[in-house]
Image (cartoon, rainbow, N blue to C red):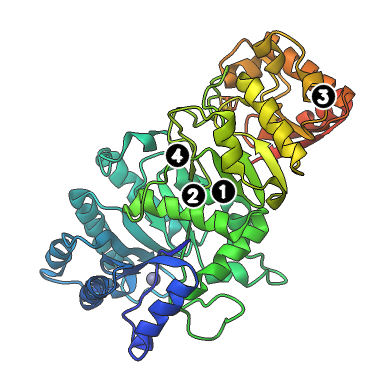
């Protein structure tokens, strides 16, 4: 369920009990551990550990602290080691101006040369940055510009997001820096300090990032043996504790630790090639709700929608090639009372299959479930009649995507006739309120959408509340 994407298992802290450390990790749901080197000997040790333990993978590289030790043919040796089948990245590399154990010039020289190795070997990088973010970003940006094909061979499914090229380990910045890096193809990795809480005069930026950046872009790591999360802060860290980090992020995002683990494991798969691509699914769990993916067809084509891309939500693959029958959906649900809600929602508009929605919803209600429909609000146009009364008694709640209050912007965002469909969506929402459904309107958190205006519109015009869905 979890992947510890950064643990230095070669340190002497583990010399006496590494077998037990690995066993405890497995017992706590850790599937894989990535062990980054910090210089030449530890890079070799990381590979030895990867050879010994199936679940361990290695990275090779010189940490900025050790840049001064990197001389002669050492980098050639790193490049040679990077050919090992269990080496998944060059790392950890970067800049650390806090300690300056190596001079900043030497650090930059070695960082640059190691990114060149990653580019030649088509590998991602694991970045350590401390009080050096401006320089790190400048160097990485330049390298991407010079080498646009770095890691471009990845599966076509990954095209919507920028090519994943690395991870900022133990992320030191705030959410706006995180989004900037995500746009450059980087993952943000969070570690023990996310569990430490805010200091009186100094907010903990990792908490802010953990609350705002969606788990699709986050990796989990312990940075063992350092940075031990609460409740074991002060003791030796180990990969089994990665779940405390997942639990904290889950709490901040209103998700489950399992959701965070699944979504971030998919990130590890994309970045490092570890683990499996998830199989397509028709029923998928997020928090304690069960979502039904009954179609991938839609009457709209939203610019922010990943329906035609990889169609992955919190690590669930929604890219079905065949639409499921009523029986298949019911079988996939199992016992509806085991979930807080049964939600019709996927990368597609459920009212395109209104008959399936109605039959499954009726069955779920009869078997004690609560039912929600997530829709773009165009069901009446799609079905050429007012469908709202048909949902009474079989659906409890309806979430409708408002997207924006400006019909022109609505049309541009959804790539449809804004005037006709915006009005249809508003009328649909009013009809749902009239029929006493529990209605929520949603918008995607995009800079170009005025949230305050949307909120006021929804309360005044429709008489319900607005909910914001994160985009990044
Ligand atoms: S309405 Fe929903 S499913 Fe359809 S394109 Fe937009 S976001 Fe995707
Ligand atoms: Zn490290």
Sequence-earlier tag: 4 or 3:
4
Q: Is residue 373 visible?
A: no
Q: Residues within 10 Å of mark 1 (few under 14, many from 20)?
A: some
146 or 286, which is in the foreground?
286
Q: CA distance from mark 2 to mark 4?
A: 20 Å
Residue that carries the numbered disc 4 in the rendered image: 280
Residue under label 1, please give it: 214
The numbered dot on residue 432 is 3
- Sequence-wise first label, 2 or 3: 2
Nearer to me, 293 or 248: 293
Residue 197 in the figure: left or right of residue 311: right
Cβ–Cβ under 8 Å for marks 1 and 2? yes
Q: Nearer the viewer, mark 4 or mark 3?
A: 4
SS for callout 2 = helix
Q: Cβ–Cβ below 8 Å for labels 2 and 3?
A: no
Q: Is mark 2 within 8 Å of ligand 1?
A: no
């Amino acid at each position: 369920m979890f992947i510890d994407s950064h643990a230095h298992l070669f340190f002497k802290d583990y010399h006496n009990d590494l077998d037990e450390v690995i066993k405890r990790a497995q017992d706590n749901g850790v599937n894989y551990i990535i062990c980054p080197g910090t210089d030449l000997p530890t890079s070799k040790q990381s590979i030895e550990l990867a050879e010994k333990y199936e679940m361990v993978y290695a990275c090779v590289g010189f940490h900025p602290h050790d840049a001064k030790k990197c001389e002669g043919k050492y980098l050639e040796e790193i490049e040679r080691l990077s050919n090992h089948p269990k080496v998944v990245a060059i790392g950890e590399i970067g800049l650390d101006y806090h300690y300056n154990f190596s001079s900043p010039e030497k650090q930059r020289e070695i960082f640059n040369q190691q990114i060149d190795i990653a580019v030649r070997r088509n590998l991602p990088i694991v970045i350590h940055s401390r009080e050096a973010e401006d320089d790190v970003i400048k160097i990485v940006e330049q390298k991407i510009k010079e080498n646009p094909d770095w890691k471009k061979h990845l599966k076509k499914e990954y095209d919507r997001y920028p090519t994943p090229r690395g991870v900022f380990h133990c992320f030191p910045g705030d959410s706006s820096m995180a989004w900037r890096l995500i746009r450059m193809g980087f993952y943000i990795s969070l570690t023990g300090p996310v569990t430490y809480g805010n200091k009186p005069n100094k907010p903990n930026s990792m908490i802010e990032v953990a609350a705002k950046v969606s788990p699709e872009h986050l990796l989990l790591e312990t940075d063992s043996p350092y940075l031990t999360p609460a409740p074991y802060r002060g003791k030796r860290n180990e990969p089994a504790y990665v779940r405390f980090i997942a639990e904290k992020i889950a709490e901040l995002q209103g998700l489950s630790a399992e959701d965070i683990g699944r979504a971030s494991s998919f990130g590890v798969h994309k970045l490092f090639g570890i683990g499996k691509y998830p199989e397509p699914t028709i029923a998928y769990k997020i928090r304690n709700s069960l979502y039904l993916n009954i179609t991938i067809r839609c009457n709209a084509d939203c610019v922010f929608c990943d329906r035609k891309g990889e169609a992955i939500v919190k690590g669930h693959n929604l890219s079905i090639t065949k639409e499921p029958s009523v029986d298949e959906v019911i079988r996939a649900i199992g016992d509806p009372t085991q979930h807080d809600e049964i939600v019709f929602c996927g990368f597609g508009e459920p009212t395109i299959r209104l008959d399936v929605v109605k039959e499954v919803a009726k069955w779920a209600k009869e078997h004690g479930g609560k039912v929600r429909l997530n829709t773009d609000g165009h069901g009446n146009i799609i079905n050429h009649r007012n469908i709202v009364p048909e949902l009474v008694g079989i659906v409890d709640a309806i979430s409708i995507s408002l997207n924006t209050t400006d019909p022109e912007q609505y049309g541009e965002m959804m790539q449809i006739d804004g005037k006709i469909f915006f009005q249809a969506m508003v009328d649909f929402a009013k009809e749902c309120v009239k029929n006493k459904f529990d209605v929520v309107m949603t918008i995607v958190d995009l800079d170009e959408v005025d949230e305050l205006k949307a909120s006021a519109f929804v309360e005044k015009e429709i008489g319900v509340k607005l909910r914001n869905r994160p985009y990044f």
